Amino acid sequence: MQIVTVVNCPLCHSTEHKIYAVLDHRELRICFECKHLFAGKFDKQRMQKVYNEEYHGSEKDMVDWNLRNNNVWEGLCRNIKKYLEGKGVRLLDMGAGTGGFALKIKERYPEVALTLIENSYFAKIFLKNNIKDAAIYGDLFELESAMDSGKFDVITILQTLEHLENPKEICENLYGILKNGGILLLTVPNRKSYKVLFNGINDGLCFSNQTHIHFFDRAGMKKMLLDCGFSKVKRVVQLGGSNHDRLMSFFQWILRLLGFSTENRFVAIK
Ligand SMILES: [Zn+2]
């Protein structure tokens, strides 16, 4: 066991927070000041074990996963289409995973120069073998140390921020390496989704994932990104871009409109 205890709220640094729920190895706390919900106590070793088991799939599983989610990658590209079409576009994908999104960018916009950050050993090997011309780093610190003066036009951080210990610090750093007028595309699980509404902390997606240590809602995320310096933050509500058929996609769109979808998606402009 390697228990981490968080004293200050990771978003507003307040020490005033109280227990919200106790889940598996995580004790969730809610901040009085900014209402952020976070794991105030968790077992890092247990989390690492879950990561290792998740990523120990064969290379075939990674290929299948990328193919299975093809519509999701297509949808994400559509969200930021106009920013990908220019000349000499530089894109950083933080938390690239098995590279499904990066491969889709390569397919649709071969001119875009890709930089990827991924800390899983197995996923990183897969990325190196499958996206030969991408620059790949283990974490943001490694990238910043190797970085020339060239900043990025587009930064994406998809279903990643909820896993990181200091999400605000990460967003501030990403803001720092983004060009003026550049954009950040960010997706996180929605702590106020219809699944959470029906099933509470046994929702199966947001709270149930043992590697999640932050739980965002719309207002909290918007405020955090504005506090990081972004001039404009827009929530993206898209029809389609998922693995559902047409009727289910329509219902999903309604949920997205109302703010009850399982994921919240934002575009922030520097
Ligand atoms: Zn707070």
Image: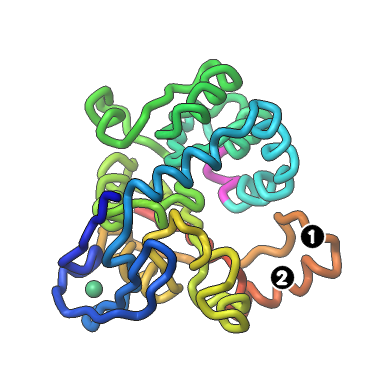
Residue at point 24% right, 53% down? 169
- Identify residue for label 1: 244
User: Is residue 268 shown above or below 107?
Assistant: below
The colour scheme used here is: rainbow
* Residue closer to the observer: 114 or 54: 54
- With 150 as the anchor, is 107 left or right in this view? right
Prevalent SS, magenta region = helix
Magenta span includes 83: yes
Q: Is mark 1 within 8 Å of ligand 1?
A: no
Question: Picture coordinates of residue 180 (x, y %)?
Answer: 32, 46
* Quarter where residue 62 is shown: top right
Q: Amino acid at mark 2?
A: Gln
Q: Are marks 1 and 2 in contact (CB under 8 Å)?
A: yes
Q: Quadrant of ligand 1?
A: bottom left
Q: Secondary structure at mark 2?
A: helix
Is residue 218 located in the magenta-colored stretch of the structure? no
- Which residue does the image show at 56% across and 33% down from the upper left? 56
* SS under mark 1: loop
Residue occupying the far front of the picture? 1
Please tell me whether residue 5 is drawn above or below residue 196 in the rendered image.
Answer: above
Residue 28: x percent and y percent? 34, 72
Tell me if residue 88 can be seen. no
Report if the beta carbon of the residue with label 2 is closer than 8 angstroms to ligand 1.
no
- Using residue 114 as the reference point, say whether residue 172 is left or right of it: left
Of residues 163 and 141, which is closer to you in this image? 163
Name the spot of residue 101 as percent of width and height, x first: 60, 39
* Magenta residues, start to end: 80-84
Q: Which amino acid type is shown beneath numbered disc 1?
A: His
- Give the mark nearer the N terminus: 1 vs 2: 1
Q: Position of residue 236 (x, y in %)?
A: 56, 64
- The residue to which callout 2 is attached is 252
Label of residue 82 in the image: none
